[in-house]
Image (cartoon, grey):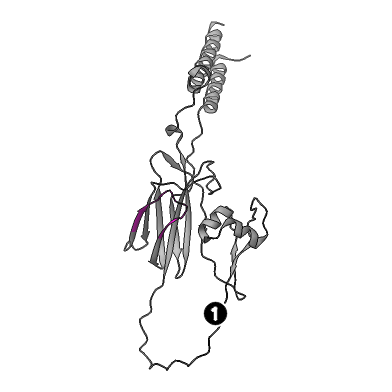
């Protein structure tokens, strides 16, 4: 036989469980995003890209500039452009220029050795509307405008800022000195991040790095869809909660009388 204390505890647990089921799930997540680096030709001149976790044909196409149809044809992929992690994709073949015969250049006098120069590279940012919240840019998920981007080096001597636009091309910062950088992206108002929004990156000379960032429209910014009769489903949820609370109170009072 239940005691008064046990009945109250069970009633409260049941009420909390129903509240948890009724409340919407937040879209605010923190998934790691993909970081792509420019592949270089191998000894045979073949330019290969190794598929990383989270890659899609769309993201690789955005990064390399190679049309998805061309990517499918070069690698004999199916119509859905199915790729697997670790798969080597052929992006193209580099042809070494054939030396042309002619008069050899006149040797120049030996010059003093110049001061070593640190190379540079590019960092590109792609902010997309992550409709399904999985942190991966997919077909049907458009670029997201209005995101604020900040890129700073580890020593705090270089700082670049910009805003994303609704274009398929990522926003690129060119001719950045090689070194360690931190990339920060703030999604536009009304959106929640679905990826990590502060990303450390080491840029080597000649690199062209692309980092994806995703954001999803906040549930608070989406107007509730009216149900039949013009009533909001939130009213039905609130009513159900009141009914459950009344049932719990009734059980408690019934036990009190015994």
* Residue drawn at (35%, 81%) of the image: 115
Q: Which residue, as the protein is rendered here, is positioned at the far left?
A: 157
- Comparing 245 with 32, the one in front is 32
* Residue drawn at (54%, 79%) of the image: 97
- Comparing 28 with 60, the one in front is 60
Quarter of the image that includes the C terminus? top right
State the image coordinates of residue 49 (x, y, percent, origin top left).
59, 63
Q: Which residue is mark 1?
A: 97
State the image coordinates of residue 204 (x, y, percent, origin top left).
45, 68
Query: Image quarter for residue 107?
Result: bottom left
Q: Secondary structure at mark 1?
A: loop
The answer to whether any part of residue 55 appears in the image is: no
Report if residue 168 lies within the magenta region: yes
Query: How many marks overall?
Result: 1
Query: Image quarter for residue 68?
Result: bottom right
State the image coordinates of residue 25 (x, y, percent, origin top left).
51, 33
Q: Is residue 43 above or below residue 212?
A: below
* Residue drawn at (58%, 15%) of the image: 3
Q: Is residue 16 left or right of residue 151?
A: right
Query: Image quarter for residue 158?
Result: bottom left
The answer to whether any part of residue 141 appears in the image is: yes
Q: Dot 1, how many residues are within 10 Å of its Cα: few (below 14), some (14-19), or many (20+)?
A: few
Q: Is residue 143 above or below residue 42?
A: above
Report if residue 145 lies within the magenta region: no
State the image coordinates of residue 205 (x, y, percent, origin top left).
44, 70
Q: Is residue 191 above or below residue 205?
A: above
Q: Which residues are magenta?
A: 160-172
């Amino acid at each position: 036989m239940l005691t008064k204390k046990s009945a109250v505890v069970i009633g409260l647990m049941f009420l909390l469980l129903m509240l948890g089921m009724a409340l919407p799930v937040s879209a605010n997540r923190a998934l790691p995003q993909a970081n792509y680096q420019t592949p270089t030709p191998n000894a045979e001149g073949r330019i290969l890209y190794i598929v990383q976790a989270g890659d899609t044909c769309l993201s690789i196409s955005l990064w390399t500039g190679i049309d998805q149809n061309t990517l499918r044809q070069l690698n004999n992929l199916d119509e859905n452009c199915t790729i697997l992690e670790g798969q080597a994709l052929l992006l193209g073949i580099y042809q070494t220029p054939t030396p042309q015969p002619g008069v050899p250049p006149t040797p120049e006098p030996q010059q003093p050795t110049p001061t070593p120069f640190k190379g540079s590279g590019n960092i590109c940012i792609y902010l997309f509307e992550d409709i399904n919240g999985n942190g991966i840019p997919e077909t049907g998920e458009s670029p997201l405008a209005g995101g604020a981007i900040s890129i700073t080096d580890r020593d705090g001597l270089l700082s670049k800022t910009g805003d994303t636009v609704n274009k398929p091309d990522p926003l690129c910062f060119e001719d950045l000195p090689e070194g360690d950088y931190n990339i920060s992206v703030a999604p536009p108002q009304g959106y929640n991040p679905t990826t990590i929004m502060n990303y450390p990156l080491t840029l080597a000379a000649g690199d062209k790095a692309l980092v994806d960032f995703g954001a999803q429209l906040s549930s608070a910014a989406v107007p509730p869809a009216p149900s039949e009769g013009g009533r909001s489903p939130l009213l039905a949820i609130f009513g159900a909660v009141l009914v459950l609370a009344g049932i719990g109170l009734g059980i408690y009072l019934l036990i009190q009388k015994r």
